[in-house]
Amino acid sequence: MSVLAVIPARFAAQRFPGKPLALLWGKPMLRHVWERARAARGIDELVIATDDDRIAEAARGWGAAVEITSAACGSGTDRVAEVARRRPDARVILNLQGDEPELESEAVSRLIEAMKADPNLRMGTVAHHESDPRVLAAPDVVKVVVDADGFALYFSRADIPKASGGRPALRHAGVYAFRRDLLLEFASWPPSRLELAERLEQLRALERGVRIKVVLGERSFAGVDTPEQMAALERRGPR
């Protein structure tokens, strides 16, 4: 079962232009993601997907495989799907966000293991317990609640279900695994009602009845959306 991992990266982020190549702890942020993805078990091919020559040149310089994708891609998932279409043998495809420099390699490994162990799983993701309830109250932190079998019931930016009061919500991390057929279907579906309301792409799958397995990580990690968040990470140092 061939596993393809794709890190989509674009230069023109609205809140943080040039974010993938911004230096963090002496390296471009995108390189941190790539290095941590390389440390995960079970990935047969790791690709950075971009439409920007600056990102492509930098990534090739540190040894990454790069695919140039269309500038018309509306989302990272569209970029991942474009790369997957070029690789018909890839059966499980991972979408790894290019702005998560503290990506947990072990959690990615366990997600791959879950997809390989159960052929009925069509989609999976990663979440973790958050010890600071104030963090979970923030609207820029995505929460997920799961059922008794570990499948996602709902994702939201809202404080569900009173997560800031210690209720059983997990902090979601932007790591996704798809079966090939589902990824290509997903990329063809229009944005859903809940997806547009919450600005969360994974709700497109839930609204169409796709069960999303949630694999627990051992530690928190989060994406970088702003230069201020990057500066805070720089001050704190890697972990």
Image (tube, grey):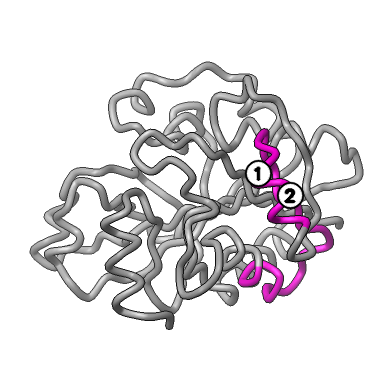
| Mark 2, other Cα within 10 Å: few <14 / some 14–19 / many ≥20 | few
Q: Quadrant of the C terminus?
A: bottom left
Q: Residue furthest left?
A: 165
Q: Quadrant of the N terminus?
A: bottom right
Q: Residue at x 62, y 44 (%)?
A: 8
Give the residues in magenta. Answer: 35-60
Residue highlighted by disc 1: 54
| Mark 1, other Cα within 10 Å: few <14 / some 14–19 / many ≥20 | few
Q: Nearer the viewer, residue 156 or 147?
A: 156
Residue 177 x %, y %: 63, 51
Q: Residue furthest right?
A: 89
- Name the secondary structure under disc 1: helix
Q: CA distance from mark 2 to mark 1?
A: 5 Å
**Quarter where residue 63 is shown:** bottom right
Image side of residue 116 versus residue 158, left or right: right
Residue highlighted by disc 2: 57
Q: Residue at x 76, y 36 (%)?
A: 68
Can you say whether 131 is above or below 92 in the image?
Answer: below
